[in-house]
Image: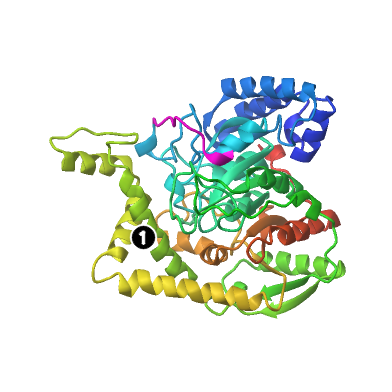
């Protein structure tokens, strides 16, 4: 019978590895077996790195045998295909980077590698992280492990699905407007977007640089805390990265939320949202009250402008960031009679429809005569949104909201209507605009057995508050996430 070590949490696996009850080789073998079995129906990975993974496992076992190995040593992870991984193809789910093999590692990859983590593969995503369903991948969509007719969410859908389906123990994603939290919610796993600047983005393909942030997926809050601790902290190669010391996040997991003031924003319970989503959040709030926390209604009055502001700021930054894909320096080159024609045909053939739409929107918003009306206005709205949160945090320590207005939707359902797709991020986008940390944890299921996620938001650098509250909720056992593995 298969040992199914792939179902362990990181905390469990780490202690078994260090006690030499299991080996990194066995753990990696179980993950790769699971990948082989589930991938035909899931498509969570763009590239599976079997050979490299076994090499890493062998090295991890040697280190574990020598004693004193770090917590992540021997832990198999999925890595969103937006991270530069030395010697491993990094596509960003785009044809334009379809054959790109980076000569270097992103800082977070380097840190995980140094600690002995194992990379089982590069996970699927929306092209250049633009989307909410992973349907914008040039390699085809990822299916939701709870119902393969539905999306896994996006843009980090492959990472969320891989963790939910036990293909790996944890994964890395990125979050510009909700790309960690929304897929975590749709797949029933934990996903955290740390404070803007908490984690280095060196070697992470840039989408919208004032919003992008790196973060983990895991099957428990503790596991997410272990990963963030490994990846966070100052990086001389990313000048936006904070030099603040990184706390031992696991120590924040005391189970105690007595006296915690939880703000519940009235603007986040909107008409048209799935009633079961609201019910689940309300009952989670009751659990918090029974643990000694208090809840208070708050207002974030500029919430209604967040999506419009986001789609101006994000597309403007994307249009600048994606100018580098010119057919000369990276990936795809389609030869043509002169340089201008080469740029045009390379970009026309290399980018997908949504990426082109974003580049056009962003270029328009930045163009002479429109800059003040659009981009500048959006930046002002962004300040108002940030001020809303600052004011709200005078009354509470933590804000609790739904992650998305609905559970996972059907594949194809929103593909012909970009504006409806953009609305999937209505509850997550403001957190990026304000630079705050936010986490999605499973808190319920709808009548189709699809997971519902709860979002916890804290002031800048208060990840410990989020993790403590999330862990306390997990411990109540008020909600037991259903595993996706059995359904595949
Ligand atoms: N869905 C949003 C977008 O398409 C957010 C994506 C993300 O966070 N990377 O821009």
Is the residue marked by circle 1 packed among few (<14), some (14-19), or many (20+) residues within 10 Å?
A: many
Compared with 231, 441 (above or below) is below
For the residue pair 331 and 33, the one nearer the viewer reads as 331
Q: How is the image coloured?
A: rainbow
Q: Position of residue 66 (x, y in %)?
A: 78, 22
Q: Position of residue 151 (x, y in %)?
A: 54, 48
Please say whether residue 417 is visible from this viewpoint: no
For the residue pair 203 and 155, the one nearer the viewer reads as 203
Q: Quadrant of the N terminus?
A: top right
Q: Is residue 295 left or right of residue 461?
A: right
Q: Position of residue 325 (x, y in %)?
A: 32, 42
Q: Residue at x 72, y 27 (%)?
A: 27
Q: Main secondary structure of the magenta part?
A: loop
Q: Is residue 102 magenta?
A: yes
Q: Residue at x 71, y 31 (%)?
A: 73
Please say whether residue 3 is visible from this viewpoint: yes
Question: Which span is picked out in magenta?
Answer: 99-108
């Amino acid at each position: 019978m298969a040992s199914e070590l792939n179902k362990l949490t990181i905390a469990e696996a780490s202690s078994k590895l260090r006690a030499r009850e299991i080996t990194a080789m066995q753990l990696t073998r179980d993950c790769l077996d699971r990948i082989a079995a589930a991938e035909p129906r899931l498509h969570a990975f763009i590239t599976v790195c079997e050979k490299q993974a076994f090499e890493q496992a062998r090295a991890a076992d040697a280190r574990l045998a020598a004693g004193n190995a770090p917590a992540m040593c021997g832990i198999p992870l999925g890595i969103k295909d937006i991270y530069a991984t030395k010697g491993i193809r990094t596509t960003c789910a785009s044809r334009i980077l379809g054959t790109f093999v980076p000569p270097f590692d992103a800082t977070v990859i380097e840190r995980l590698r140094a600690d002995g983590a194992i990379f089982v593969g590069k996970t699927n995503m929306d092209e250049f992280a633009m989307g909410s369903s992973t349907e914008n991948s040039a390699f085809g969509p990822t299916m939701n492990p709870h119902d393969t007719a539905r999306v896994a969410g996006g843009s980090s859908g492959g990472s969320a699905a891989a963790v939910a389906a036990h293909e790996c123990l944890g994964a890395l994603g990125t979050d510009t407007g909700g790309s960690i939290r929304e897929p975590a919610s749709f797949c029933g796993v934990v996903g955290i977007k740390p404070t803007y600047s908490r984690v280095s983005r060196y070697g992470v393909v840039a989408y919208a640089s004032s919003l992008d942030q790196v973060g983990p997926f895991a099957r428990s809050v503790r596991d997410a805390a272990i990963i963030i601790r490994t990846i966070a902290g100052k990086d001389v190669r990313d000048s936006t990265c904070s030099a603040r010391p990184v706390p031992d996040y696991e120590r924040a997991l005391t189970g105690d939320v007595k006296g915690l003031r939880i703000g519940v924003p009235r603007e986040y319970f909107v008409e048209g949202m799935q009633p079961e989503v609201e019910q689940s959040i309300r009952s989670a709030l009751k659990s918090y009250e029974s643990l000694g926390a208090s809840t208070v209604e708050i207002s974030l009055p500029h919430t209604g402008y967040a999506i419009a502001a986001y789609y101006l700021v994000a597309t403007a930054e994307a249009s600048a960031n994606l100018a580098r894909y010119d057919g000369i320096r990276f990936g795809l080159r389609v030869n043509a009679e002169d340089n201008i024609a080469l740029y045009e045909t390379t970009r026309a053939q290399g980018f997908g429809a949504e990426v082109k739409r974003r580049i056009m929107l962003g270029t328009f918003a930045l163009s002479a005569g429109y800059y003040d009306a659009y981009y500048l206005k959006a930046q002002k709205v962004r300040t108002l949104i940030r001020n809303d949160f600052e004011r709200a945090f005078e009354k509470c320590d933590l804000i609790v909201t739904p992650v998305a207005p609905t559970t996972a939707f059907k594949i194809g359902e929103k593909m012909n209507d970009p504006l409806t797709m953009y609305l999937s991020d209505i509850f997550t986008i403001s957190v990026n605009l304000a630079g705050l940390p936010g986490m999605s944890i499973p808190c319920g299921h709808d009548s189709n057995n699809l997971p519902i996620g709860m979002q916890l938001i804290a002031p800048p650098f208060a990840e410990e508050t989020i993790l403590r509250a999330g862990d306390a909720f997990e411990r109540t056992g008020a909600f037991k996430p259903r595993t996706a593995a059995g359904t595949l």
